[in-house]
Every structure is written in C-alpha cells, then in structure tokens.
Image (cartoon, rainbow, N blue to C red):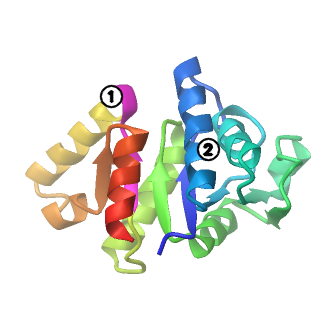
C-alpha cells in the first residue's frame, strides 16, 4: 500500500507549467492521503510540490543536509523535517521513508536520485515502484538514451522496465491505483 511517495524534482522552477504540475501533484497526493517525502526545499518545483500538499492538508516529510539549510532553502512550514549530514544520508533517509518513487522534471540531482533508486531496484535492494513523469516530453531524450543502452547490451530489458513512464498525472494516478 502506498502511504508515502518520494518525489524527485527540481530546486529550480523551470517553466510555469512545470510549477503548476508540481502543485497539482501535491494536491493529488493529499487528496489520496499519500504523504510526500522529498528533499525539503521551499524553492522551485520542490517548494511548489510541498505547498500543494500542505494546501490540501496533507503530510510532508522533508530531508535536507545541514549545508543546504545554512543556505536558507529549507521549507519552514514542515512538521516532519530531517536534518542529515550529507547528500548520501539524504537519499538513504528519503528511500527508507518511502513506499514508491516518482521523478518529475528537474536537473542533475533529480537524475542522480532517479538513477540511484533504479540501480538499487536492479540490485534487488528494494522492489518499490518507480515512475517517471514524462509530461510534455521532458524525458524523451533520456528515455531514448536508456533504450539505446539496452539495445547495445548495457541495460537488460527487465532492468529498463524498472522505470514506468507516465505521460500525465492522471496516468500516474491510474497506474498507482493498479499497484495498490
């Protein structure tokens, strides 16, 4: 059962539509009584996502290294907030708290988190679902590269299938409903 979803996303805003999507995802999580686990920031898509959950009365768990808290990017309105020493501890804590994972648009950190949790699935450290929200084709090139790596013998088809691509929030919701 999905009680808490870890969302990997950008600390930057991207275009306005991505901000809207993050907020809408937050609403969707709260309405379905799924807690949000994320990197704890008040900025970018991360902040919009957390604010979306909080606006609908949902629960949010933030996890952030002290070095980022010192930069004053931590979301101050979270009741459940973990301060950790470094990014490795941050990812471990987020993974431990979560029942599944969803990557939405973001940069290097988002990709790092997505690839690490997928690698852990490949190594059978977990069997939690992993989704990739490919709205507006944001991840088309990435998915193309992964398929190329599979065709060239670097990623098995079963490992490629650890990531479920969804093209919209409603598609994610439908897929999530099937998995509970």
- Marks 1/2 in contact by CB < 8 Å: the verdict is no
Q: Residue at x 43, y 41 (%)?
A: 169
Nearest to N terminus: mark 1 or mark 2: 2
- Residue 151 lies, in percent from the top left, at 9, 50
Q: Is residue 108 magenta?
A: no
Q: What residue do we see at 55% from left, 47% from top?
A: 28
Q: Between residues 135 and 143, which one lies in front from this camera angle?
A: 135
Q: Is residue 101 above or below residue 49?
A: below
Quadrant housing residue 6: bottom right
- Give percent across and percent down for residue 67: 83, 52
Q: Is residue 127 above or below residue 68?
A: below
Name the residue rendered at 68%, 36% in the picture: 48
Which picture quadrant has residue 19?
top right
Q: Secondary structure at mark 2?
A: helix
**Helix or strand or loop: what does disc 1 sit on?**
helix
Visible residue check, residue 109: no
Instruction: Give the residue drawn at x 74%, y 41%.
Output: 51
Q: Quadrant of the C terminus?
A: bottom left
Residue 57 % position (x, y): 75, 52
Horizontal arrangement in the rendering, residue 1 relative to residue 137 (left or right) = right
Residue 95, image x, y percentages: 57, 69
Would you name the residue on which mark 2 appears? 27
Q: Which mark is residue 68?
A: none
Compared across the picture, whether 118 is left or right of 140 comes to right
Residue placed furthest toward the bottom? 125
Q: Residues within 10 Å of mark 2 (few under 14, many from 20)?
A: many
Question: In the image, which is nearer the foreground, mark 1 or mark 2?
Answer: 2
Spatial separation of the CA atoms under disc 1 and disc 2: 22 Å
| Highlighted range, magenta | 130-138
Mark 1 = which residue? Answer: 137
């Amino acid at each position: 059962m999905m009680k808490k979803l870890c969302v990997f996303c950008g600390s930057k805003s991207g275009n306005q539509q991505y901000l809207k999507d993050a907020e809408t995802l937050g609403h969707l999580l709260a309405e379905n009584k799924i807690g949000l686990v994320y990197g704890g920031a008040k900025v970018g898509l991360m902040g919009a996502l957390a604010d979306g959950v909080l606006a609908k009365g949902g629960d949010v768990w933030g996890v952030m290294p002290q070095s980022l808290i010192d930069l004053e990017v931590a979301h101050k309105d979270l009741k459940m907030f973990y301060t950790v020493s470094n990014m490795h501890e941050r990812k471990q804590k987020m993974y431990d708290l979560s029942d599944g994972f969803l990557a939405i648009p973001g940069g290097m950190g988002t990709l790092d988190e997505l690839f690490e949790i997928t690698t852990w699935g490949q190594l059978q450290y977990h069997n939690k679902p992993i989704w990739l929200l490919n709205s507006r084709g944001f991840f088309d090139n990435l998915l193309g590269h992964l398929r190329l790596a599979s065709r060239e013998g670097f990623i098995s088809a079963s490992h490629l299938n650890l990531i479920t691509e969804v093209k919209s929030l409603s598609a994610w919701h439908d897929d999530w409903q099937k998995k509970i």
